[in-house]
Image (cartoon, rainbow, N blue to C red):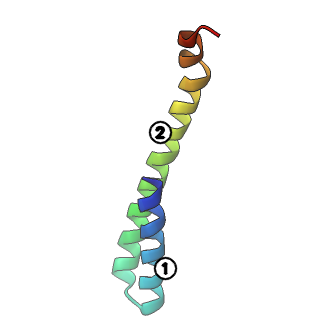
Amino acid sequence: MLKWALILAVVALVAGLLGFTGIAGAAAGVAKILFFLFLIGFVIFAVLGVTVFKSVAGK
C-alpha cells in the first residue's frame, strides 16, 4: 500500500509539472488516503505486536 502511495505521489508531481492539475489533484488525493491507511494499519499491528502477540508467544 505504501508503494502505491509513493507511485501516485510521483504521478501527481509529474502531472503537476506538466500542467495537468486535475489529474495531479486526484492522484495526490488518492496517495494521501493510501498513506493514511498504511499508517493506521502500521500502528494497529505495532500495538498488537507489543501487547497481544507477545502474550500469546509466552514471553
In the drawing, does residue 52 fall left or right of residue 29?
Answer: right
Mark nearer the N terminus (2 vs 1): 1
From this view, report whether residue 18 is shown above or below residue 9: below
Residue closest to the eye, 34 or 55 = 55
The residue that label 2 is drawn on is 41
Amino acid type at image mark 2: Gly
Provide residue 18's location: percent of width, then percent of height. 43, 92
The residue that label 1 is drawn on is 13
The label shown at residue 21 is none
- Whether label 2 touches label 1, CB < 8 Å: no
Provide residue 25's location: percent of width, then percent of height. 40, 74
Callout 1 environment at 10 Å: few (<14), some (14 to 19), or many (20+)?
Answer: some
Quadrant of the image for the C terminus?
Answer: top right
Residue closest to the eye, 21 or 3 = 3
Q: Quadrant of residue 15?
A: bottom left
Provide residue 48's location: percent of width, then percent of height. 54, 24
